[in-house]
Structure formats: structure tokens, C-alpha cells
Amino acid sequence: MFWLSHHHEEEYNRTYVLGGLRVCARCLGTYPVLLACMAGLFALRAPLQWRWDVPVVLGLTLPALVDWAVGRFRPASGSNPVRTVTGVLLGLALGRSLYVHLQRPLPAVLLAQAALVTAVAVPVILATYRRPRPG
């Protein structure tokens, strides 16, 4: 079931097996926390702007990006618990930025987050694109 784990067989070390299904370790941390964070922010009617939004959201996003980037260069490195923890942090960051975005489209916090992801992902993808896949 590819929608539960977007990893191919040679990347199964990046997944957990739950009930016989493979689940991406980082996504397992990201999506439940993202949804819970958004639900909590909506329930609390949290403000749409906090002065520390951008640095906190970027700080929470960065560990997942760094871990992902290292994994692209060294596919056998890393551990699933670390991926899950960085996914939890990413879920908090995405929960906050998407909460604001759903009420005020394209806020500074979301644009800063998108810029950070792009600034890390594009060079890493380009640098590793032609490398042979393990296996």
C-alpha cells in the first residue's frame, strides 16, 4: 500500500511494519501530529500571528530537512526513531503554518517555511539525482 509508505523496497529500512503494512517512519510522526496540532489551534482559536512564528516554525522544520538530506547522501544512515521524532517536530511546524494559511492564505510563516524547504531540497535532489540507487 504505497500511500502508507512512499518508500521502495530498497528503502524499507525507513519504514515500520504495523499490522503487516509498511508505514514511513517520518510520516508516522508528521501527519498525526499535524492534524492534532491544527485541531488544537482551531479549538483554542489561537492567534493568527505570533511574533515568534517564523523562527519557531523554521526551527521545527529544519531537523526533518537535515535528516532527510543526510539520508539522501548516505541511504543506510539514520534511524527510524530519529525520523519519527523529526516527523513530530515537522508536524508541529506544518500544523502551525497550515492553521494560519487556511485562514489567511500565504502568510509569511508558510512562505518562509516553503523557502527553507526549497533551499534545502532542490540542491540535495540535484546533487543526488543521478546517483545509483542502492540495491
Image (cartoon, helix red, strand yellow):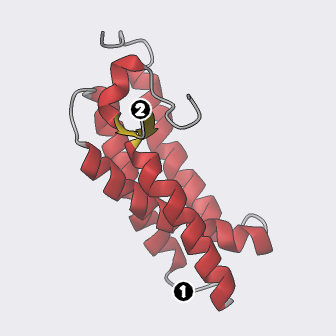
Q: Residue furthest front?
A: 19
How many numbered badges does the structure rendering display? 2
Q: From the top left corner, tell me how far across and down residue 16 is, in percent.
A: 35, 39
Q: From the top left corner, tell me how far across and down residue 120 is, in percent.
A: 44, 43
User: Could you tell me which quadrant the N terminus lies in?
Assistant: top right
- In this orientation, which residue lies closer to the viewer: 87 or 69? 87
* 98 over 47 or under it: above or below: above
Residue 47 seen by the camera: no
Q: Which mark is residue 90?
A: none
Instruction: Locate residue 123: give its quadrant.
Output: top left
Question: Dot 2 corresponds to which residue?
Answer: 124
The residue positioned 49% from the left and 45% from the top of the image is 119
* 24 over 61 or under it: above or below: above
Q: From the top left corner, tell me how far across and down residue 87 is, in percent.
A: 41, 55
Instruction: Locate residue 131: give its quadrant.
Output: top left
Spatial separation of the CA atoms under disc 1 and disc 2: 31 Å
User: Could you tell me which quadrant the C terminus lies in?
Assistant: top left
Q: Which mark is residue 51?
A: 1
Count neighbours of disc 2 (C-alpha within 10 A) and say few if under 14, some if 14 to 19, many if 20 or more: some
Relative to 79, 37 lies left or right = right
Relative to 35, 16 lies left or right = left
